[in-house]
Image: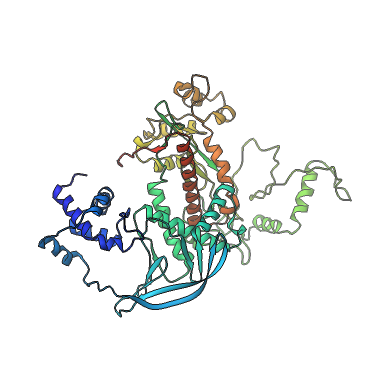
Amino acid sequence: MDLPLVLIDRFIRFARHFKPEISLSMQDPIAPPKYLPPHVAQFLSKALELSAAIISTLWSTLRFDVWDLVSAQLCLSERSLFDEHGSRTIAKHHKLGTISRVQATYFTRDGPFPAYSTSLRCKSDTCDIRYYLNYSVDIKQHIRQYYVSDDIPEVLHLEEHSFIQTALSELFTACTLFAWVHESRFVLTSIQVRRAFILISLLRDWREQGSTLVMLEQGDLDLRLKDLISERNNRMIIAGQPERLHACDICEKRSLRAVVTDGTTLGHYSCKVHNCTEPLVNIRHHWCPTHTKQLQHFCVFTDCNRPARHGYRTCDNTAHSKYEEYRNLKTKGFFLLRQRLQRAGIDQPSSSLALDTTLEDVVDLEGGQIEDPVHKSDKGNRPSKVLFARRRVHNVQFVVATCGVIIAQAPMFGAESISGVKDFLKSVYPNPQDLPDVLFYDNNCQLQSHLQAQGDNHFCGTMLPVDVFHFKSKHKESDEFCQKHCNPSQWTELVGEDGEWVFNSSAAEQSNVWSGGYQAILRDMLPHNFNFFLDEMIKRRNEVLIAKLRCEGRAPYCIPSYPAQ
């Protein structure tokens, strides 16, 4: 940033002139806040003709110098900028009145207590702002704006008649983070626990961004939070986790930085059309809004375009209708077990099975075939041809540093395809110079083959070995391409002097154990809640791991990102 000295001097004097205004939003006016109030930053940006990012950088660098100045004199031309960019009204410092008070409950770590929710409004007829504990509300525009603060408030105004201690909500979050405790296991309702978690997480995120949290005041709270959650999710997709470019003494050795990517069987419900990414409106829906109009009245067999019969989900094709009738039989389990007995050549006894008789579990494929788990077809698993049940995304793909810090996550719709993994990695590292030096993946042989076929050079500066566990157990020795390009032992940098591997290439598998604990919590979430919850748990887990690495002297840090190309 190269600015004229005159402009920097003007910024300092303007900012000092606003010290009383800035102090109004502070609990402790002795030290300057980390971030300027939005209206002050907006005025400085317009008056000095500088971007909001530059104003933020100047304040972050010079705020202590500004705060210690005795006074700041403005010339006549500078004062005229207030007429051009400032408020059109003159502050008269009206006292707040028009008190509104309703009974409420205050939930704390020591139990619930009776309380009152009090709000105040300016006595002036021209002022439409009512002030609450954590936020103000524009009565005419129905806009809620949370107060600017360096810290999360100790008490959160959760609902009209309830407050919650932030420490209590953080305790619930810690139980979920470390012990996978579901929100329904607490004494408070699951809705209250979830809303407190979301609000605190959003306040933290907006404070870290140097922004003010603003939301609608009227309407269902969950719908209003959905817009903020989606905004946070989109920002996470673009900017990534704070530890996206993490490095430490464990995952960076011999001047090489290593990560692992792998998938785990988590997933939210998705549209039944293959690879459709449009979110569902409700978890009970089978199709997204676009495909609901097109497919809800057609036969559920994927290769059939005939309309479904009234009251049924299959068409008038005899085979299709009989399969639906068969599927809906209440005694279906009995017929399947009898079929398995006949297949095994065992006559059905007249009495119940003996106590020492063992039968294998029966798998009902959606295609109507009963699969023998021992004698599977040599042709491999056949794709399902009928979709009665709802569909989930295939898996969630993770990128994990070899020290255990999770870099990124993304759902894989349809399948964990090579092209999908490639696109995911490119979204995490859009600039090739940000890529790690080593990228372990259990299917790197197929990934390299795909990259060569596509002429894609994005990963040309990165080693792409198969992780040690999968290379020994899943890849054939006869696969010459894999042995030549993906055998981890061919890179001497990955093997230590003692013959041990330098990096833990199973870090992703180990993180999958942690993320798998959220299966029951995540299974019935819509996509926006699913991604928000998982991203927030990853962020908080990373914070704990970073603190642990720092205590162990592992020197964790983030590598500066290269500018986007």
Q: Most extreme residue toward the right, as rendered?
A: 350
At which x and y percent is residue 408? 45, 43
Q: Is residue 555 left or right of residue 125?
A: right
Residue nearer the viewer, 102 or 352: 102
Q: Quadrant of the N terminus?
A: top left
Q: Is residue 446 above or below residue 359?
A: above
Q: Is residue 100 left or right of residue 111?
A: left
Q: Is residue 128 left or right of residue 402?
A: left
Q: Is residue 52 above or below residue 541?
A: below
At which x and y percent is residue 22? 28, 60
Q: Quadrant of residue 439?
A: top left
Residue at 38% in and 47% down:
239
Residue 51 appearing in the image: no
Q: Is residue 141 above or below residue 426?
A: below
Residue nearer the viewer, 343 or 106: 106
Residue 38 appearing in the image: yes
At which x and y percent is residue 60? 28, 49
